[in-house]
Image: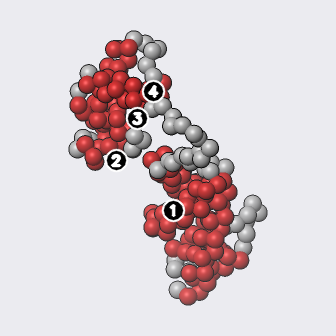
Amino acid sequence: MASQLETVRRAAIGSRKSVGYDWEGAMAASLAGDAAAYRRLLEEAGRWLRRYFARRLSPEMVDDAVQEALTALHLKRATFEPGRPFLPWLAAIARFKGVDCLRSAGRNRTEELDEGLHGVPSHESASLSGIVMAGLFERLRRPQADAIRLVKLQGFSVREAATMTGQSEALIKVNIHRGLAALKAFFGEGEMAPELIG
């Protein structure tokens, strides 16, 4: 057993494929219990994730996204199937964590106040939009309005909206589709606000 572990460890750490780091070998060694191979795998994965997120997220979000993805890698490592390519598996984790970071940033968005302002900006447009939207949602069935409000306007995922409303995920999707179709019919094709439909 010890010689097998040493063989796997040498394959993971000592050798390199012609194209770079041996991800699959390192993961196999890690799953076999080699702590040194696992530490090295996390270091390499951290570097790869930093490059991945640097192209997709704002600079202030990269560190959090890398940590979230490394945590997910640690928690989900038992689901990795030896013999399968490692990087597509890591990329799937990174993609989901990147979306989570963007969604979270959208909910927590803040804007700096311009200290040079001498007056208070008008909220008339936002107030009128709110009144119009409330009137439109009154024309829909309550489950449709709730689904559209949560997913399309407030940015929650379908799963989160299902949990909040008690509807199934499939029903949330159906209610969004039917609700938007009803609003399109009310306005006529092409006149619907694109930010609501998109």
Q: Which mark is residue 103?
A: none
The tag on residue 160 is 2
In the image: residue 84, left or right of residue 17: left
Q: Earlier in the sequence, mark 1 or mark 3?
A: 1
Residue identifier under label 4? 125
Q: Do the residues labelled 3 and 2 touch (CB within 8 Å)?
A: no
Q: Which of marks 2 and 4 is nearer the N terminus?
A: 4
Q: Can residue 124 be seen by looking at this rendering?
A: yes
Q: Viewer-nearest of labels 4 and 1?
A: 4
- Mark 1 touching mark 3, by CB under 8 A? no
Give the residue number, with chain letter if any, for mark 3.
152
Q: Can residue 103 be seen in this view?
A: no
Residue at the image point whose x is 59% and y is 41% from the top:
117
Extreme residue toward the right, this view? 18
Q: In the image, what residue type sits under mark 4?
A: Ser
Mark 1 and mark 3: span between their CA atoms?
25 Å
Total residue callouts:
4
Residue depicted at 54% across the width and 65% down the height: 67
Provide residue 54's location: percent of width, then percent of height: 66, 54
Residue 168: x and y, percent?
26, 41
Between tags 3 and 4, which lies in front? 4
Q: Distance between the residues labelled 4 and 1?
A: 38 Å
Q: Which of 107 and 156 is in front in this view?
A: 107
Q: Which amino acid does label 3 sit on?
A: Lys
How many other residues sit within 10 Å of disc 2, few (<14), some (14-19) or many (≥20)?
some
Cβ–Cβ under 8 Å for marks 1 and 2: no
